Image (cartoon, rainbow, N blue to C red):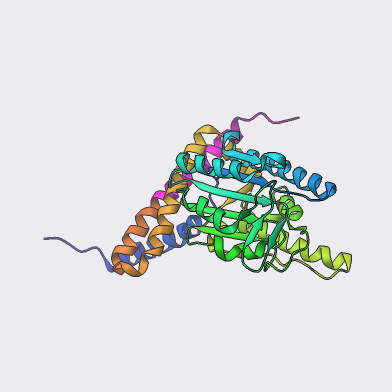
Amino acid sequence: MVVAPPLGCHLMRCALIRSLVYLLVSLAWAPALAAADHFVILGGLGGEPAFAALFDKQAVELRDLCRKTAGDDSRVHLLYGNDARRENVKTLMERLAKQAHPDDNLIVFLIGHGSYDDQDYKFNLPGPDITAGQLRSWLDAIPARQQLVVNTTSASGASLEPLKSPQRAVIAATKSGRERTITVFAEFFLEALEDAAADTDKDDVVTGLEAFRYAEQKVKEFYETEKRLATEHALVEGEIARNFTLARFGSAQQAAADPATRELLAERDKLQAQVAALRQRKDDLPPQEYESQLEKLLIALATVQARIDSAVEDKLKLEPIKQ
């Protein structure tokens, strides 16, 4: 005869599972520590010498910041100046389409001038420009499961609609193609990747969404301080902007610097992607099956997270104390 466990034990177990799930859900939606797989930085035309020098400087600074975040220089790609020609951009995107895997992430930055003729957004380059439609076709061919485009150019708002898709978030410096004045958004977006104040949830990671909010507020303050009418109003399309790690500080930076920990971070990335995919299928599954699958993924995720935390703590204990 099978004896059922006391009701109190059953209730305690249910309460424990619920508490665990609530805790793990927050972990599951925390931004991944692992570096985005591929960064692409495109520095376009400046027109005037002063603007050309500014855009080149920003592109190089961004490359250096992305290398620090990626931990692998080969995954950070920069085209600027005379090298940023449409055929070179196309070649780079086609190469990434062959190299990238579905579990990879892709982050693309556009720095420079953009234009809008009431029909198409164009990113201004030496020689033929790139339209938003052309850029989208190249991005669609890259199998990276999540993509983020950060368009800091003038008139960048006109690129929001053509570029957005379920697997791609888009950040634009302007709200439409009619805001055609040079923007200051890029300056403050770069600042967000170096200022721990941009890390609003204090997890030592700056996500795409956090960097956007930081830059958005700084742009507003800039125009107020200068007592000028704002000629740019940044927008973001896509909730997955919060999933991209653009900068790390403190313990998060230490974890990413260790090769062994990076493997755990990659494993955690995959589990988080599975959680996100399962959540999208929630309405298609019976409630019990959904909860069962979610619980298994979250427990696996918590296990990996515990191993990451333990590895970071062990490394800190082994490091000599600086006098």
Residue drawn where x is 47% and y is 44% of the image:
97
Q: Nearer the viewer, residue 188 or 205?
A: 188
Residue drawn where x is 65% and y is 57% of the image:
122
Dominant secondary structure, magenta: helix
Expressed as whole percent of the image width and height from the top left, the position of residue 201 reads: 63, 58
- Residue furthest front as drawn: 127
Expressed as whole percent of the image width and height from the top left, the position of residue 93 reads: 54, 44
Q: Nearer the viewer, residue 223 or 182?
A: 182
**254 inside magenta stretch:** no
Residue extent of the magenta highlight = 300-323
Expressed as whole percent of the image width and height from the top left, the position of residue 73 reads: 60, 34
Residue drawn where x is 84% and y is 68% of the image:
224
Q: In the figure, 2 relative to 191: above or below?
A: below
**310 inside magenta stretch:** yes
Expressed as whole percent of the image width and height from the top left, the position of residue 31 reads: 55, 53
Res. 208 image quadrant:
bottom right
Q: Is residue 296 visible?
A: yes
Q: Is residue 34 visible?
A: no
Residue drawn where x is 63% and y is 65% of the image:
158
Q: Nearer the viewer, residue 267 or 125?
A: 125
Q: Quadrant of the N terminus?
A: bottom left
Q: Quadrant of the C terminus?
A: top right
Q: Is residue 10 left or right of residue 164?
A: left
